[in-house]
Image: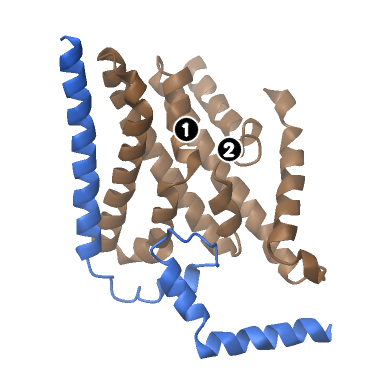
Chain colours: A blue, B brown
Amino acid sequence: MGQVGYLILAIVIIIALIAFFTTFFILYKKTPVPPGCEKVASEQCAGCNARGCEFYGSYLEEASSPKATEENKIEENKDDSK
Amino acid sequence: MAYFTAFILAIISGMLINNVLLSRFYGICSFVGVSNKLKNAFWMGVAVVVVIVLAALICYPLYMLLDAAGISFLRTVVFILVIASLVQFLSFVIKKYSPTLYKAFGIYLPLITTNCAVLGVVEENAASHAADFGAAMANALGTSLGYLVVIVLFSAVRARLETNNVPRAFKGLPIALIVAAIMAMAFTGMKGMA
């Protein structure tokens, strides 16, 4: 196999991997969230600031909700009183 | 028997002596970010173990193929694509077929795509264990178990600190980094065992 052959093999491998990634990414996005797992981000995310993470947005939304803000204020008041 | 002993020693070496987090400093981002709660840290560690072992299993023969074809210079790009595809595949399968696993560690899988520990292990296997599949797998298993052990220990310490009287300026990330530094110093003491 000559140099051109190896180059073509390299391009085929990379294109195949990109195709795999794209296929599974699309399948993942199209799969609905399993029942009972809707609030998984707010329950498990610990504010890791990984902005690239798809759960970052839903975690922020939950964290800035009125109930969460009130709980944070109570925590801050406890710290101040110490 | 000697091979089995060497295999076990390689795993222990990867776990404790050349720990991926505290000796080699790979994957620190997720280590600090996901270790607030013990349960989250445990499942993050399990997800990392699964991804690293599978990535090593797939990338090893792929590297052999690239090397035989004389295009091993493409290994980094290929490894990154393999890891990303593997993580997407696992995420899809877990989301579709196992709600229990999805709830347990489904949200941590996207974090692992960009985790240097995974790429570091497969690159290391390519560079130094290319001739021996057993050594490559021992490295992968040891590294990933080392990640799991350290992240669980770290989150346990952080959980204890939550109830302690930490000065306000040190709460959260600063004290976490100090704890990580002290743990790294402790693990340095194991280097002499190599």
Question: In this figure, which residue is indicated by the disc labeled 1?
Answer: B121
Q: Residue at x 53, y 20 (%)?
A: B6
Camera sees residue B1 = no
Instruction: Report the disc number at residue A2.
Output: none
- Neighbor class of circle 2 (other Cα within 10 Å; few <14, some 14-19, many 20+) is many
Dot 2 and dot 1 residues touching (CB under 8 Å): yes
Q: Which residue is found at the position 48% from the left and 74% from the top? A: A60
Q: Earlier in the sequence, mark 2 or mark 1?
A: 2
Could you tell me how far apart the alpha carbons at marks 2 and 1 are, in whole angstroms?
A: 9 Å
Q: Secondary structure at mark 2?
A: loop
Q: Which residue is mark 2?
A: B20
Task: Please give the chain letter of the residue carrying mark 1.
Answer: B
Farthest residue to the top: give it.
A2
Q: Are marks 2 and 1 on the same chain?
A: yes
| Left or right, B20 with reference to B101 | right
Left or right position of A26 against B51: left
Q: Residue at horizontal 53%, vertical 89%?
A: A67
Kind of element beneath mark 1: helix
Q: Nearer the viewer, residue B80 or B194?
A: B80
Amino acid type, callout 2: Val
Query: In the rendered image, which quarter is residue B11 located in?
Result: top right
Q: Position of residue B85 (x, y in %)?
A: 29, 44
Q: Can residue B5 be seen in the rendering of this structure?
A: yes
Frontmost residue, B183 versus B152: B183
Q: Amino acid at mark 1?
A: Val
Residue B96 position within the rendered picture, expressed as x and y whole percent measured from the top left? 23, 62
State which quadrant residue B53 falls in: top left
Q: Position of residue A41 (x, y in %)?
A: 43, 70
Whether B12 is drawn above or below B33: the answer is: above
Q: Is residue B20 above or below residue A42?
A: above
Task: State the residue at coordinates (59%, 36%).
Answer: B15
